[in-house]
């Protein structure tokens, strides 16, 4: 595993909290397609790409966050994209503090259960970044989001 779980969050999740869901192949893992379109590799060089390819059906797309192998022959990798996960506010309700209160509630719940919350956000989403900083989140690293297609 990388030096820190947040450097390769999908891999870490599939090896720990979500190990019961993981479909694995020696250095590669993925969620079942009906659960989530995310896959991961432990270490990008070497056989990880072939192992990952063995887990993905023809015409299927998966996403990798952070660590990604070289694309296997015949695969297409879309450009890296930072991501934001599952927090949004309808435009009619921005500026009311709803996102901040929701995030505070979710973060406190995570802390109460022994988890460390983390966020993904588009680098140009200054409004969301402002909310996150008010809640004491700090920039840790820029993680790319890879879309891998056969």
Image (cartoon, helix red, strand yellow):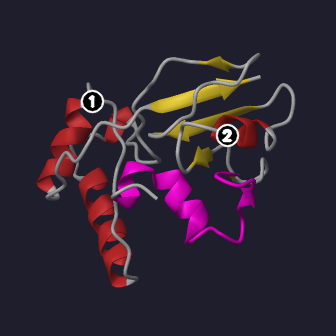
Q: Dividing the picture into quarters, in which one does residue 52 lie? A: top right
Asked whether 67 or 123 is in front, the reply is: 67
Question: Going by the picture, which residue comes out furthest to the right?
Answer: 58
Asked whether 22 or 98 is in front, the reply is: 22
Q: Does 140 sit left or right of 121 as displayed?
A: left
Q: Secondary structure at mark 1?
A: loop
Up/down of 99 relative to 72, above or below:
below
Q: Residue at x 72, y 19 (%)?
A: 75
Q: Nearer the viewer, mark 2 or mark 1?
A: 2
Residue 128 screen position, x and y as percent: 26, 40
Residue 120 among magenta residues: no
User: Badge 2 is on which residue?
Assistant: 47
Residue 20 among magenta residues: yes
Near mark 2 (Cα within 10 A), the count class, few <14, some 14-19 or many ≥20, is some
Residue 35 screen position, x and y as percent: 72, 54
Q: Dividing the picture into quarters, in which one does residue 137 lie? A: bottom left
Q: Residue at x 73, y 43 (%)?
A: 51
Q: Earlier in the sequence, mark 2 or mark 1?
A: 2
- Magenta range is 4-29
Q: Residue at x 74, y 18 (%)?
A: 73
Quarter the C terminus occupies: top right
Up/down of 89 relative to 17, above or below:
above
Q: Dividing the picture into quarters, in which one does residue 85 lie? A: top left
Q: Does 41 sit left or right of 113 as displayed?
A: right
Q: Residue at x 55, y 51 (%)?
A: 42
Q: Secondary structure at mark 2?
A: loop
Q: Does 136 sit left or right of 30 as displayed?
A: left
Question: Going by the picture, which residue comes out furthest to the front?
Answer: 46
Q: CA distance from mark 2 to mark 1?
A: 36 Å
Q: Are marks 2 and 1 in contact (CB under 8 Å)?
A: no
User: Badge 1 is on which residue?
Assistant: 125
Q: Does 93 sit left or right of 50 as displayed?
A: left
């Amino acid at each position: 595993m990388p030096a820190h779980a947040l450097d390769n969050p999908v891999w870490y999740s599939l090896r720990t909290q979500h190990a019961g869901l993981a479909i694995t192949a020696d250095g590669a893992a993925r969620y079942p397609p009906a659960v989530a379109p995310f896959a991961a590799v432990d270490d990008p060089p070497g056989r990880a790409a072939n192992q990952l390819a063995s887990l993905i059906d023809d015409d299927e797309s998966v996403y990798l966050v952070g660590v990604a192998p070289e694309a296997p022959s015949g695969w297409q990798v879309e450009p890296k994209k930072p991501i934001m996960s599952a927090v949004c506010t309808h435009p009619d309700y921005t500026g009311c503090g709803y996102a901040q209160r929701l995030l505070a509630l979710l973060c406190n719940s995570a802390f109460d259960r022994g988890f460390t919350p983390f966020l993904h956000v588009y680098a140009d989403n200054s409004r969301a970044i402002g909310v996150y900083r008010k809640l004491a989140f700090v920039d840790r690293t820029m993680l790319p989001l890879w879309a891998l297609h056969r």
